[in-house]
Amino acid sequence: MTPRRGGAAGGRASRVRRAVILGVSVVLAAGALTASPASAYLPGPVDDPLRTAGVALAADAAADTGIAFGACPKDSGLAAPVQCGKVKVPVDYADPGGRRIDLLVSRLRATGPASGRQGALVFNPGGPGAPGLWFPAVGLKSAGPVTRKVWGTAARTYDLIGFDARGVGHSAPISCVRPENYIHAPSPDPRTANAAAQTRERAKARGIADGCGRRSASMLGHMTSADMARDLDVIRAALHETRLNYYGVSYGTYLGAVYATLFPRHVRRMVLDSVVNPDPQGVWYGANLSQDVAFEGRWADWRAWAARYDSVYGLGSTASRVQASFDLAMRKLAKKPAGGTVGPGELHAAAENAAYYDQRWVTFAHQLSRYLHGDDKPLVAAEAPDRSGAKAAENGDAVYLAVQCTDAAWPRDWGTWDRDNSRLALRHPFETWPNAWMNLPCATWPARAGEPVDVGAWSAELPPVLLTQSERDAATPYEGALELHRRLQGSRLVTEVGRGSHGLVSIWNACLVSRVDRYLTSGDVGDADARCAGHPVPVPSGTLGAKDANTGRYY
């Protein structure tokens, strides 16, 4: 639900709108050539003129104000030399004179010589809903050895810029559920879709959607990816950068693609890592169904790996026997939760994490193995809900829903959900219903959904964009990278062959990292796409752990 305006506020808003509408003709006629360099741009074809002018006004104001960087909030975990500052943006870009919110931005100055500095590199970690304020810490000497290797070139060459997107963390956070009521543990098997589960989950989803409408009404209609892309342009202007250098991971790739579509002439360099499929026909209902298929394949990868090391974990010598061990643990936890808090839902969440990242294969195999051998301590220690993190977790889920439910229309009738997911779950049971339950609040979402951005319009105006993707990524299936590659003229795709870890920014793969480093340094994307051999998967070193051949660390 969007708030109504009236009285004096309504009059002020209408005056601002009239001024903005008049300004649109000037912006469009003159190509914004008379605006300040930080805010000037020729608008793309997909944004409406009112919001185009609203962004121009907000960016111009941000360029004049800049960012007063200083100490970061104590609860951010960031200390000098990382600094933080605020950027003001309108809640509604069609009403730039209305309510504004503060976005918190973090910065680490480039560590290399001034002669080699190439501006600011803005990072978004995805989600949607993941906080990004932490990012500059990857450039500190205290960062881990792999992190330092991956981000070494960027830290020397660019000011590293993180930020909490609108609605997230320190930037006008939204909420759908009271955090103290957010965690319910132990939780049931999310793969179940019998009549009782449907009744329970549908009621839960309606409650979440209603709670979002009650607790976050003033923001809920302004949480689209296009809104966040407009925020990016205001941040760019506040940093006094004429063009944006951007690194996006997961959902951050979609945000970057939307930005590149709305502001094609404001892009300098852009790396999109683990690519969301931008096809408007799939945003977001279809994209989640595609995820379910990919997760089944990735779950099969883990089961095959665990079977290979049956002598270590004793989970079974074939993938089907490993599956039987997992199912047995799910049944046992349903009858008696481990530690009173870890049920089948928590175990499934741990399995999902293993499907996301092969760095977690060892720890998950160890937890499952020890539990089935009578020791639940590793499982409880790792998977028992952390109630101290409930506020941040609830906020992240609220933003996730607010973005995905308003970017595009979702089916409103339960019959469509039931039909599509029931069919898919017959062959892809691992993630189908868990994914459906997560997204079901979109069926009764209180804010009106918009139209997906036609990503890639005017891509001829873009400089070359670099895409990186693993072939077996479950969260962002490979076909999404191919689709965005097709839509962005001149882009290059670097593929990690045969692997499926999500977010290659966290992986040391010399072939892939060298391509990213070369691009960030020179803008050179190469003459052709590249295929890099996959990074080594973990190799167990005993029942209590393994040496990860990628990082050299023991788990």
Image: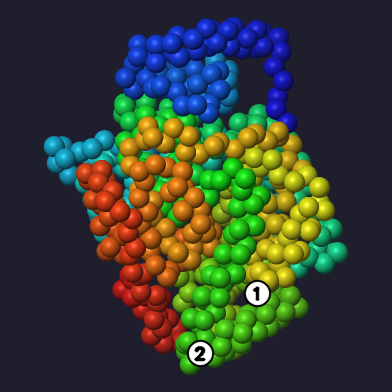
Quadrant of the rendered image containing residue 74: top left
Q: Where is residue 421 drawn, in percent x and y?
A: 73, 60
The residue that appears at 71% across and 9% down in the rendered structure is 7
Kindly identify the amino acid type of the residue bearing the numbered disc 1: Gly
Distance between mark 2 and mark 1 Cα atoms: 26 Å
* Mark nearer the viewer, 2 or 1: 2
Can residue 47 be seen at all in this image of the molecule? yes
Q: Which residue is mark 2?
A: 310
Between residue 530 and residue 407, name the one nearer to us. Answer: 530
Between residue 455 and residue 132, name the one nearer to us. Answer: 455
Q: Earlier in the sequence, mark 2 or mark 1?
A: 2
Between residue 268 and residue 80, name the one nearer to us. Answer: 268
| Residue 68 vertical placement versus 294 (above, below) | above
Which mark, by number, is residue 339? 1
Quadrant of the rendered image containing residue 499: bottom left
Between residue 332 and residue 520, name the one nearer to us. Answer: 520
